Image: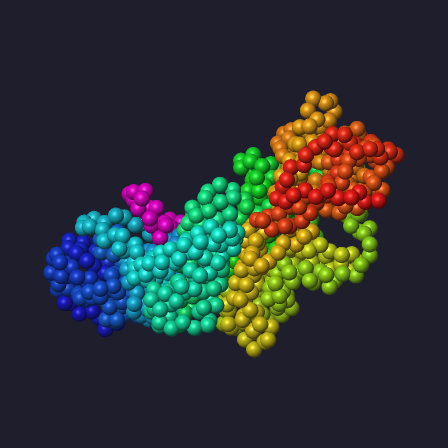
Amino acid sequence: MVEASARLDLSVIVPVLNEEGNLSPLVEGIQSALGPCGLRAEILIADGGSTDGTLQEAEALAAEWPVRFVAASSGRGLAGDVLVAARQAKAPVAVVMDADGSHDPRVLPALAQPVLDGTHDLVIGSRYVKGGHTPGWPFLRRLLSRAAGWLAWPWADVADPTSGYFAVRRERLLRVDPAAEGFKILLEILLSTGDGLRVKEVPVTFRDRRKGISKMSFRQGWSYLRRLSALAGGEPSSANAAKFAVVGMMGLALDLVLFQILWSRGFGLSFSHIASFLAATLANYALNGRWAFRESSRGRLHGASYLRFMAVASMALFLRGGVLDLCHDELGWPALASVVAAIGATALINYTGNLFFVFPRRGKSDQRLGWRTAAVGLTAYALLLRFAYLGVVDLMPEEAYYWNYAQHPALGYLDHPPMVAWLISAGTALFGHTEFGVRIGAYLCWLVAAIFLFALTRNLLDKEAGLKAVMLLSVLPFFFSTGFIMTPDAPLTACWAGALFFLERALLAGRPRAWWGVGACMGLGLLSKYTILLLGPAALLFILVDRRSRAWLARPEPYAGALLALLCFWPVLEWNAENGWASLAFQTVRRLGMKSQFSPHLLLGAVLVLLTPVGVAASFRVLASRRWWTSEGETNHPAGRRHRFITVFTVAPLAVFVLFSLRHEPKLEWTGPLWLALLPAVAWGIGRDGVGRGERLVAFCRRGWAPTLILTLLFLSGLLHYLAMGLPGVPYPRRMELPVAWEEMGRSVGRIEEAVDGTCAGRAGRSIVVVGMDKYFLASEMAFYGAPKEGGRLRTASRNLFGLDGLMYNRWASAETQAGKRLLLVSFKPADLSDRRLAPWIQKAGELRSLVVAKGGVEVCRFYYRIVRYSGHPGGASGAINEVEGAMRTPAVSATESPDHRPG
């Protein structure tokens, strides 16, 4: 072997396995690349157990070049062999590259020099940055390579985390876990060598091997997944996966047997599936802890792990409830088949929850990697949960009201702009007039908001904060609801997030074209809800207080963006102009003219509900303490203009609501979107021990985030289960304040309407209109859930026919258009249907009757109804019982009808 000089710059580590014929051109290429640069290197051939002539070729090269043969044979694949060679390396910088000719030695100086200069700790030869290529690769190989990178994306902040060509400080390489295995040693360096790793990527062209056979196999793929899971905080293995499957099958058998016993004995679907699940869960916990995950739990069970297990099990239970209800009630599957599908759908939740949360990897874990894992897990769960329940929870009255928007197309409505109607129209056109069709627009709007929020947070701070910001968007109550409930807040939140993203690009990144994005998002936001106007004064305030941004006042781009927003909003302005500025007056003059009430405490209570107490504490910490932003030791701390941006775009809109609350009562959801500007900073602080260590508020937030997120998500998932299927021992409220049993009530009213119309067949002018005797709840829900009539909807009206406000029903069903018609009046209060209340508007009135509405065999409410003939104006006289109504047999719905005495 030729002796290397006393001073070495590089140790080039080449892992090999049966690479005969590839070593000579590689060594010559390395020397040709490094020689002109004056870099001195040793080349270590790390052999993993070659059976061809690789050893002999290496020995021949050692006689001429500074080559050493290292009989690694670690048994842990390429990663283990590289670590064996690294321990024998003599230079301070190591370069790892393949022997098969796929890595161009001419790139070596570009990889090594930044590390040698001390500006970076790791330089990666990347196939996926600008300038990188993979010529000649078949589609499947490209797909698999990309998929491996995508799987690592949440934890690795580089474009090519699976590259095998890189330069790294040797001491960093030696920090890698000795248990590392498989082909992806770079991933180990990125995720397990501590914070502060300075990384750079340079483009490389990766060509296919010249000779020999590729070492990639299914086994290597499984090894990659296992190591990625271990680095993310779990401890997967073929053994525990198989054992978990066995335990799962045993639990499945117990679950199904007990479910079938309870179901066959007459217990409800909800009680049967919850009781059988809990019994199987207890058995699974004991078997998993003492057998399947014995290495992680050390064979011992304790209270903390049991609480974590029950949290995971409860989340799985509530998700499977949605799948069960979907299969059984919506798709019509048998109960047993439905519960099997539900169990299968939640098996992955159980396994990953046990792997990463209940029985995590033993030993010291990286807290910040753990939070990334939590962000991925909680976000994915929230997405699955909402999707499972989109079509099984009854519409809220507000959603049914907005569905009625879509049935009456217009460029504007009294209480909101038309975007919510357009989204519902698109959803129902694709998926029918179903709950899923109504809500899918909200679900997609949440995805848009998540993309914009992640991009905003990454630009302001870093990728890790972006992941945690999306986690907060997934779990915090307001943002969770906007991804499920179809109201104007859903598109408003998406547009607000988009506007903030483009405002940051324009104001902080200085990109003129971003103002077009600001204008588009503001315009679409104005088509959703007028609240987004608050971002305009906030942007102007930022420009005035930020010296570098004042130049925008003299540039055309901000004004062009404002013009674009105005053009988007123009149809609504035109509709308002044609209708006496009704909508704008409704949201401004009317609200300001409401009864005076000092309500800052109500505003604070609303914020506590929307953000949770820990979220409010973290928000206060961000806004109140400048020192929080400049903590020593943090290289990516938000500061200066970024701090100003977040503060202005949070505080300026909030100030408007605070001022309003001094004299008026705010609504619960009003402040929701404005917290989007603060989420990046709040997310950045999660899991950072170095920030304000001694302060009580910071300590409270640091300790409180994990239980808050878990408990909040458990509450929200349990609430969805309760709304869809109920919970044993928890009755429904009797005032129909929740989206529960509206479908059952709608069917009852629809059958009454059909029966009345049926008895009047052939009589002219006998078609009936259903009138909900409240503002819009009953009319809207009955229109959606009642028997379909003309155009697929029941004809409904509101209390506006009797002199009270009915919002858009004032226009949809005016008194003049209903004059002379028979009305089926429906109310939860018999007094609303009394002779005294109705006499000025009716000609004849039938008997007052009531029906009980039940869900799952449990009484939810009683509603009252009465059939009258409407005169269309005050002054009509009440007559005798309508002869048609008196002859009608009312269909039984969930309970027997009970006639009531007429109220006086």
Measuring from the top left, give residue 724's x and y in whole percent: 56, 50
Residue at figure coordinates x 29%, y 44% from the top left: 137
Residue 136 horizontal side relative to residue 260, left or right? left
Quadrant housing residue 812: top right
**Residue 408, visible in the rendered structure:** no
Residue 419 horizontal side relative to residue 1, left or right? right
Taking the magenta stretch, the answer to whether it contains residue 125 is: yes
Measuring from the top left, give residue 103's x and y in whole percent: 27, 53
Given residues 816 and 71, the one toward you in this image is: 816
Residue 283 horizontal side relative to residue 735, left or right? left
State the residue lying farthest toward the right.
875
Residue at figure coordinates x 43%, y 73% from the top left: 302
Taking the magenta stretch, the answer to whether it contains residue 597 is: no
Residue at figure coordinates x 23%, y 53% from the top left: 215
Which quadrant: the C terminus? top right
Given residues 368 and 624, the one toward you in this image is: 368
Magenta-highlighted residues: 124-148
**Residue 88, visible in the rendered structure:** yes
Measuring from the top left, give residue 751's x and y in whole percent: 64, 35
Quadrant housing residue 159: bottom left
Residue at figure coordinates x 47%, y 66% from the top left: 308
